[in-house]
Amino acid sequence: MDEPTRREDSEAWQLEETSPTQDVAWAPSEASRSTAGSWWRGPVQAVRALIETVIPALVIAIAINLFLAQATQVLGQSMEPNLHTSQRLVVEKVSYHFHGPRRGDIVVIDLPEAGPELLIKRVVGLPGDTISSQRGQVFINGEPLDEPYISSPGGRDIPEQVVPPLHVFVMGDNRQFSNDSRNFGTVPIDNIVGRAWFSYWPPDLLGLVD
């Protein structure tokens, strides 16, 4: 009678010794390891997304602004009736890498001596031109200049002068209310930011600038 009892006790002891509960107490589950290791993945993925999308987009935008085009706003009435104050334009910077400014182009000028703001004017005189004006009529090399974009000629006369190399003579279309080359002289071509190309605001003025 005693011998079976000892056998049962021995088997019970062996079962207890090899019980799987002994392993669970010391080995963390796969789920707990996954949770413990995932806390840093969110920030890393966010930084990666920033590097892959936002930064390249920013670089492209800066490159476009520096080398291809930029937006600008018309301030003042010097280009009336063709451009109006607060009108917003796209200025393209590409074409003048292939050719110089052309007569009649509307250009944006960065001229610190004329003030801190960018100026927008029309090219009237080109390098080497002899320019003058009398009673509102502009003469280029002794010939009257046809300017269909002007509604009311006027302003002070231009004494005869020769436009220097690599310079242009610019004027506003609203001749009586324009600060232009009649005041600050000819403009170095290097100071031209670009050519006014497209009007995008307000919507009723949407279209190419000419």
Image (cartoon, rainbow, N blue to C red):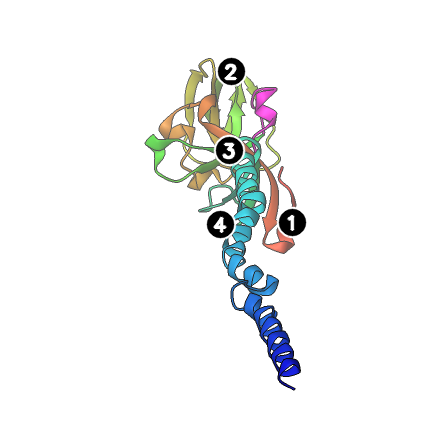
| Dot 4 crowding, Cα within 10 Å, few <14, some 14–19, many 20+ | few
What kind of element bears circle 3?
helix
**Closer to the N terminus: mark 2 or mark 4?**
4
Judge whether residue 105 is colored magenta.
Answer: no
Pair 2/1: label in front: 1
What kind of element bears circle 1?
loop
Q: Amino acid at mark 4?
A: Thr
User: For the residues marked 2 and 4, what is the alpha-carbon distance in whole angstroms?
Assistant: 31 Å
Question: Which residue is the site of mark 2?
Answer: 129
| Dot 3 crowding, Cα within 10 Å, few <14, some 14–19, many 20+ | few
**Closer to the N terminus: mark 4 or mark 3?**
3
| x, y percent for residue 145 | 58, 25
| Dot 2 crowding, Cα within 10 Å, few <14, some 14–19, many 20+ | some
| Dot 1 crowding, Cα within 10 Å, few <14, some 14–19, many 20+ | some
| x, y percent for residue 23 | 57, 65
Q: Amino acid at mark 1?
A: Leu
**Closer to the N terminus: mark 3 or mark 1?**
3
User: For the residues marked 3 and 2, what is the alpha-carbon distance in whole angstroms?
Assistant: 31 Å
What kind of element bears circle 4?
loop
Question: Which residue is the site of mark 4?
Answer: 85
What residue appears at the point 52 percent right and 51 percent down from the top-left corner? 44
**Closer to the N terminus: mark 3 or mark 2?**
3
Judge whether residue 93 is colored magenta.
Answer: yes
**Closer to the N terminus: mark 1 or mark 4?**
4
Q: Amino acid at mark 2?
A: Asp
Q: Give the quadrant of the N terminus.
A: bottom right
The segment highlighted magenta reads 92-104
What residue appears at the point 57 percent right and 60 percent down from the top-left corner? 34
Kindly indicate whether the residue at mark 4 contacts the one at mark 2 (C-beta within 8 angstroms). no
Kindly indicate whether the residue at mark 2 contacts the one at mark 3 (C-beta within 8 angstroms). no
Question: Which residue is the site of mark 1?
Answer: 206
Pair 3/2: label in front: 3
